[in-house]
Amino acid sequence: MTSIGWMPAARRACENFRAATAGSRNAKHSVYIALLHDSRFPERWGLYVGQTSRDPDWRFDQHKLGYKASGAVRRFGVHLLPELVEHLNPMQQWESLELEAALADAFREAGIPWVEGGH
């Protein structure tokens, strides 16, 4: 795979987050990050940030199949980057929604040129 110059900045951005509800009794939600690549433009790589109550791998497969899919992940999703968020998951739903948005904002602030999701 091609080296993505902004990936260290994405890793650093994720390290700054903690989930207060991680591992709690009702922790059933996860945030996930998918790597995006537009093959029409070899230099165009990005990140999608989502949250789910399902297994993130299963959710990624749903995106790729078009079920409740983000168009960006369906068309450009390469694979998940679980190592970026494994220290956060699982957590309670309210926190997954907050962290989904906060991670997307942090990636944008870190200079990641293409960020999707984070609703």
Image: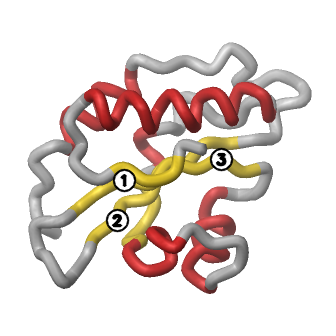
Q: Real-space Cα distance between discs 2 and 3?
A: 16 Å
Snapshot quadrant of residue 76? bottom left
**In the displayed structure, would residue 44 be above or below residue 108?**
below
- Looking at the rendered structure, the kind of residue marked 2 is Leu
SS for callout 2: strand
**In the displayed structure, would residue 14 be above or below residue 4?**
above
Residue drawn at (20%, 36%) of the image: 111
SS for callout 3: strand
Percent across and percent down for residue 38 are: 26, 75
Q: Check disc 2 and report the residue beneath it.
A: 36
Percent across and percent down for residue 13 are: 33, 27
Q: Which residue lies furthest to the top in this view?
A: 20
Contact between labelled residues 1 and 3, with CB atoms less than 8 Å apart: no
Contact between labelled residues 1 and 2, with CB atoms less than 8 Å apart: yes
From the viewer's perspective, tell me whether residue 22 is left or right of residue 40.
right
Percent across and percent down for residue 42 are: 11, 75
Residue drawn at (43%, 80%) of the image: 75
Q: Earlier in the sequence, mark 2 or mark 3?
A: 2
Q: Which of 90 and 50 is in front in this view?
A: 50
Near mark 3 (Cα within 10 A), the count class, few <14, some 14-19 or many ≥20, is many
Location of the C terminus by quadrant is top right
Question: Which numbered dot is residue 47?
Answer: 1
Q: Which of 69 and 78 is in front in this view?
A: 69
Location of the N terminus by quadrant is bottom left
Q: Real-space Cα distance between discs 3 and 1?
A: 13 Å
Q: Check disc 3 and report the residue beneath it.
A: 51
Residue drawn at (66%, 65%) of the image: 59
